[in-house]
């Protein structure tokens, strides 16, 4: 996997209010770092005043720290501890020590109280900071909170260094993936917009590239000897090299890249293949490639890569599960109602490592339009197909509305071990209360049909990332006992 996400170096700064012993914070800081183990930098400067705060920030920066924990070992100094968030250029979390490691006479720290004033001061300063759901605890408990902070910090750092490269425009009569890009600039994300013609020119310049042979061998090894479309591999290899070279040559001052690329209908007639398999391979390398110039889909995928440190995918929230398949493979096997299930699909863009029986195919929908007279597919070859492997997933998306405000949703569920009896990269998904989530979030809040999928239970981290970004509208699949705003109670 190409390293297309940040490496988090975590640091801890302890703070102490002057009327409490600094040694108490220092002892508790040492215990926290010991409980965390390797991979955390323990700042030797204990912050009691503004000068200490400046020295501590300079110290962690010199140590290469890019994500910071401010630790209230006792009540803490309100102004200096929040100035740290002003002066440190990176994600910051605040936690506080619970009592119990000493007596409640000389060994009481009152950090439980101090964190309230700390939060109040952060609000006065308008500073974003991560405060976990359980921010006060023992060294062992807070070490777990630090570990949970790492993927959140990785996503925040990744977005600051991200460039989304697009090749468009969107296909005609395909407004679903449209979203104003101003909100991306507000997040600090760079966008480079190019035309499909720019991509074709770059692709043609790679004709005869001496690296094509080795790339074809890679693809052939991945697809196996039974690939009926091996003849298309040189073209696909040429295209993959085109995108990889473009990423390197156009990242500019940014460290990380994602693509949002047009993939139909002119693509097939001019490039003579579909790009789905190459998209799947780049996503498997950690470089998301969204279909249909879905810029916010690419952004969402990249956040998922940062949080999970693993390949993700982008799928249509596509079709209902037929009653016959539900009765045959789901009912009595899984604890889901029919309407809590659906099929997530895309033409063939999902990393082969995430598919059962991954194989190369052709894009059936494109063939209907572009090759109605041909008995065999030609210019529509190049998908990677198979049922998505069973396991836990998190479906999510970050999206801009027409007013450029950002909103997001996060829903945990699973892919079921079900034969979808269809084509493309496809899976039978189940999300608790999906029918209500579909109506009162996806429809009511006007989300497009593309959703990003991270493999595993990553809802906690994604929810906190969106909170850190200042997004106030974060939806999730609410349990049956909790109505949505506007949900009719008289069903």
Image: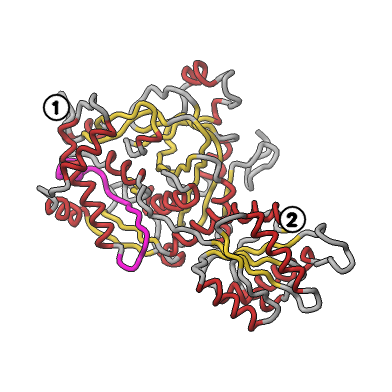
Magenta region, residue range:
252-271
Rounded to the nearest angstrom, the CA distance separating label 2 from label 1 is 69 Å
Q: Residue at x 52, y 49 (%)?
A: 445
Q: Quadrant of residue 479?
A: top right
- SS at badge 1: loop
Q: Evaluate whether residue 450 shows in this view.
A: no
325 to 260, vertically: above or below:
above
Looking at the picture, tell me which residue is in the foreground, 173 or 18: 18
Q: Evaluate whether residue 79 shows in this view.
A: yes
Q: Quadrant of residue 358?
A: top left
151 to 278, vertically: above or below:
below
282 to 57, vertically: above or below:
above
Q: Quadrant of residue 371?
A: top left
Q: Position of residue 144 (x, y in %)?
A: 64, 51
Q: Is residue 256 magenta?
A: yes
Residue under label 2: 138
Residue under label 1: 374
């Amino acid at each position: 996997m190409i390293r297309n996400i940040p490496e988090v170096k975590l640091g801890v700064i302890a703070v102490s209010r002057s009327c409490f012993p600094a040694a108490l914070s220092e002892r508790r800081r040492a215990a926290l770092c010991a409980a965390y183990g390797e991979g955390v930098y323990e700042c030797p400067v204990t912050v009691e005043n503004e000068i200490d705060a400046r020295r501590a920030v300079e110290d962690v920066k010199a140590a290469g720290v890019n994500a910071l924990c401010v630790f209230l070992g006792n009540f803490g100094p309100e102004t200096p501890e929040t100035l740290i968030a002003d002066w440190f250029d990176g994600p910051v979390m605040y936690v506080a020590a619970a009592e119990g490691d000493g007596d409640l006479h000389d060994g009481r720290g009152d950090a439980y109280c101090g964190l309230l004033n700390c939060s109040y001061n952060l609000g006065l300063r308008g500073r974003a900071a991560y405060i976990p759901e359980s921010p006060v605890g023992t060294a062992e408990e807070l070490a777990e909170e630090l570990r949970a902070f790492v993927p959140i910090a990785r996503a925040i750092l990744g977005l600051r260094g991200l460039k989304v490269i697009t090749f468009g425009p969107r296909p005609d009569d395909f407004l679903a993936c449209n979203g104003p890009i101003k909100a991306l600039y507000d997040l600090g994300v760079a966008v480079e917009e190019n035309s499909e013609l720019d991509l074709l020119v770059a692709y043609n310049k790679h004709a005869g590239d001496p690296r094509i042979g080795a790339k074809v061998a890679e693809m052939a090894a991945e697809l196996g000897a039974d690939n009926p479309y091996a003849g298309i591999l040189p073209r696909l290899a040429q295209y993959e090299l085109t995108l990889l070279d473009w990423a390197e040559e156009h990242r500019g001052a940014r460290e990380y890249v994602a693509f949002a690329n047009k993939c139909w209908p002119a693509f097939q007639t001019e490039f003579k293949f579909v790009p789905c398999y190459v998209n799947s391979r780049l996503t498997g390398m950690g470089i998301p490639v969204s279909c249909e110039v879905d810029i916010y889909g690419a952004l969402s995928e990249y956040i998922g890569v940062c949080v999970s440190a693993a390949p993700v995918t982008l799928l249509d929230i596509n079709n209902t599960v037929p009653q016959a398949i539900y009765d045959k493979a789901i009912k009595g096997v899984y604890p889901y109602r029919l309407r809590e299930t659906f099929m997530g699909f895309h033409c063939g863009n999902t990393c082969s490592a995430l598919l059962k029986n991954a194989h190369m195919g052709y894009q059936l929908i494109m063939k209907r339009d572009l090759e109605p007279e041909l008995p065999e597919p030609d210019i529509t070859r190049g998908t990677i197909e198979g049922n998505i492997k069973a396991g836990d997933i998190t479906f999510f998306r970050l999206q801009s509305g027409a007013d450029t405000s950002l909103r997001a949703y996060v829903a945990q569920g699973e892919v079921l071990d079900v034969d979808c009896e269809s084509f493309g990269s496809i899976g039978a998904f189940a999300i608790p209360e999906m029918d209500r989530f579909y109506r009162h979030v996806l429809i009511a809040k006007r989300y497009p049909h593309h959703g990003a999928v991270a493999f595993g239970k990553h809802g906690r981290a994604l929810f906190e990332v969106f909170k850190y970004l200042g997004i106030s509208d974060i939806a999730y699949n609410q349990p049956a006992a909790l109505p949505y705003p506007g949900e009719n109670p008289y069903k």
